Image: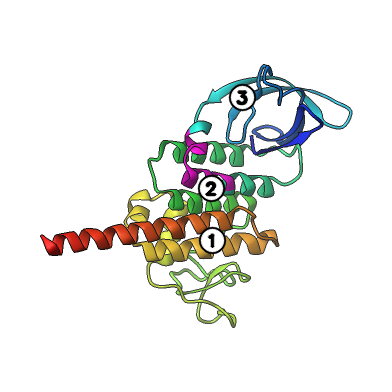
């Protein structure tokens, strides 16, 4: 389930990403009442099996069965929650028209939310890997191993968002950026699932990649994701705490 909003005094309109029918919006009647038979199962991040009855304008939710119970692990941790919200917003934006089958995007989204919930990998890497792969499903993945304009095999140092990714010296447009060595390799590792290489990358490269990936996605969407600033602010605060902690540890070791 991607999101929900109130309807009347007791109902909600829910937005679902389904495997066979893509985006589906439906009315969950009475779900805000305390005695609702499936209210607790209809929350963002929930992986569910839902039965819908055709309505005049929107379908009606008639039954909900939980498949995976990882939503609580995401909602109860603010870092996971902000990352998850960015993933859900991206999924809705990239799913396209309502009722268009989206099996690859559905499979990718369920898998990454499960990984976010169990905390097995760093949240920032999971988010960037998801954004890169989701853009690949939509046909917007940045070129990383060849020139985006002439397809000359790389690696190439320059990157230009409007051109479509990395560009060779002959095709390099004005305004291209030159990321530090290793940044585009990290993007490739995230896209391809090379987690050993990705997790070994320095934090400076990870931060640079996050900026490039977000800019590339939002350029194609032609609008900003509302949830990404929340993720960025949390990371900045998280890094500040980590840096202060490291400084204190350093002081302790010097004093000892």
Q: Using the image, tell me which numbered label, if any, was put on residue 69.
A: none
Name the residue at the right extreme. 56
Q: Are marks 1 and 3 in contact (CB under 8 Å)?
A: no
The residue that appears at 60% across and 49% down in the rendered structure is: 137
Between residue 84 and residue 178, name the one nearer to us.
84
Q: Are marks 1 and 2 in contact (CB under 8 Å)?
A: no
In three-dimensional space, the C-alpha distance between marks 1 and 2, rounded to whole angstroms, equals: 17 Å
**Up/down of 235 relative to 3, above or below:** below
The residue that appears at 41% across and 55% down in the rendered structure is: 238
In three-dimensional space, the C-alpha distance between marks 2 and 3, rounded to whole angstroms, equals: 20 Å
In screen coordinates, is 256 left or right of 173?
left
Instruction: Tell me the crowding category of disc 2: few under 14, some 14 to 19, or many 20 or more residues within 10 angstroms, Cα based.
Output: many
The residue that appears at 49% across and 44% down in the rendered structure is: 78
- What residue would you read off at disc 3? 40
| Magenta stretch, main secondary structure class | helix
| Residue span colored magenta | 73-85
Of the image marks 1 and 2, the number of the one nearer the N terminus:
2
Looking at the rendered structure, the number of numbered marks drawn on it comes to 3
Q: Quadrant of the N terminus?
A: top right
> In the image, residue 171 lies at what x, y percent?
57, 79
Between residue 157 and residue 123, name the one nearer to us.
123
Q: Quadrant of residue 99?
A: top right
Callout 3 secondary element: helix
Q: How is the image coloured?
A: rainbow
Of the image marks 2 and 3, the number of the one nearer the N terminus:
3
Q: Quadrant of the C terminus?
A: bottom left
- What residue would you read off at disc 1? 213
The residue that appears at 20% across and 63% down in the rendered structure is: 251
Q: Is residue 178 magenta?
A: no
- What residue would you read off at disc 2? 82
Instruction: Tell me the crowding category of disc 1: few under 14, some 14 to 19, or many 20 or more residues within 10 angstroms, Cα based.
Output: many
Between residue 186 and residue 72, name the one nearer to us.
72
């Amino acid at each position: 389930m991607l999101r929900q909003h109130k309807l009347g005094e007791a109902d909600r309109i829910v937005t679902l990403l389904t495997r066979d029918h893509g985006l589906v919006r439906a009315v969950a009647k009475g779900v805000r009442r305390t005695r609702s038979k499936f209210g607790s199962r209809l929350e963002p991040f929930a992986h569910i099996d839902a039965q819908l009855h055709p309505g005049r304008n929107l379908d009606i939710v008639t039954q909900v069965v939980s498949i995976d119970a990882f939503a609580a692990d995401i909602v109860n941790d603010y870092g996971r929650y902000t990352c998850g919200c960015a993933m859900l917003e991206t999924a809705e934006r990239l799913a396209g028209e309502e009722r268009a089958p989206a099996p690859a995007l559905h499979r990718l989204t369920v898998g990454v939310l499960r990984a976010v919930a169990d905390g097995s990998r760093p949240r920032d890497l999971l988010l960037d890997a998801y954004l890169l792969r989701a853009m690949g499903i939509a046909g917007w993945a940045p070129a990383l191993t060849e020139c985006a304009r002439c397809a000359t095999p790389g690696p190439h140092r320059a990157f230009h968002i409007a051109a479509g990714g990395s560009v060779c010296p002959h095709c390099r447009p004005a305004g291209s950026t030159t990321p530090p060595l290793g940044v585009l390799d990290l993007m490739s590792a995230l896209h391809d699932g090379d987690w050993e290489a990705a997790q070994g990358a320095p934090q400076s490269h990870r931060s640079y990649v996050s900026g490039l990936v977000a800019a590339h996605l939002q350029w194609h969407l032609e609008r900003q994701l509302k949830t990404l600033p929340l993720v960025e602010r949390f990371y900045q605060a998280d890094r500040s705490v980590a840096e202060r902690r490291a400084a204190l540890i350093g002081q302790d070791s010097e004093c000892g």
